[in-house]
Amino acid sequence: MLFAITNAMLVFTLGTCVFALVKGGTAERIGAAVILVNLLAGVVNESRLHDQLVNLALDGLTAMALLAVAVRYASFWQGAVMLLYALLFGLDAYYFVLERPRDNLHLIVNNAIFFAVSACLGAGTALAWRRRRRLATA
């Protein structure tokens, strides 16, 4: 059951990132690219390395990259996504420091936060697209 939910989340995130790359503004496109790189690196890590330190580093680097984008473009949704990635970093740090193996709780919390990241990206893209369309008709 959790495997099916994880795959559905993966498809949702990929769809949201494609939507952001096609219809988003500059901030949304950069954010989608950063999230896609994180997602790809995470999938490679989970399928090959299974290293918690790599997950920790990926989430920390992604949070820092999204912080730079949020500061540069002063986008509310980017700030929310950056804070969500900081939560992911904290979750990974908790499991890494306590040397706990990742369990179902980690999977559920990780997927919930990643769903929120994708939802913020989709909402930010929809708002940017709507704003551009409104300016074009005015």
Image (spheres, rainbow, N blue to C red):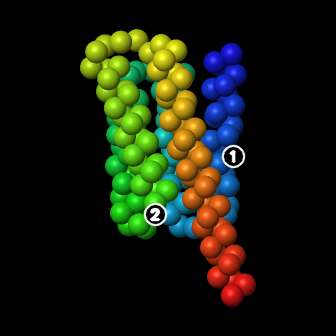
Quadrant for the N terminus in the image? top right
Q: Nearer the viewer, mark 2 or mark 1?
A: 2
Q: In which quarter of the image is the C terminus?
A: bottom right
Q: Residue 58's quadrant in the figure?
A: top left
Tell me, yes or no, if residue 21 can be seen here.
no
Q: Can residue 52 be seen in this view?
A: yes
Of the numbered discs in the image, which one, if any, rests on residue 75? 2
Q: Residue at x 69, y 31 (%)?
A: 8
Mark 2 to mark 1 CA distance (whole Å) = 21 Å
In the figure, 99 relative to 25: above or below?
above
Name the kind of residue labelled 1 in the image: Gly
In this rendering, the answer to whether 91 lies above or below 12 is above
Which kind of residue does numbered mark 2 sit on? Ser
Query: How many residues crowd around disc 2 within 10 Å: few (fewer than 14), some, or many (20 or more)?
Result: some
Q: Could you tell me which secondary element the residue under label 2 belongs to? A: loop
Which label's residue is closer to the chain start, 2 or 1?
A: 1
Q: Which residue is drawn at 46% across and 48% down?
A: 81
**Residue 60 coordinates in the image, percent (x, y):** 34, 40
- Residue annotated with mark 1: 15
Q: Which of 125 and 7 is in front in this view?
A: 125
Tell me where residue 90 appears, x and y as whole percent: 34, 32
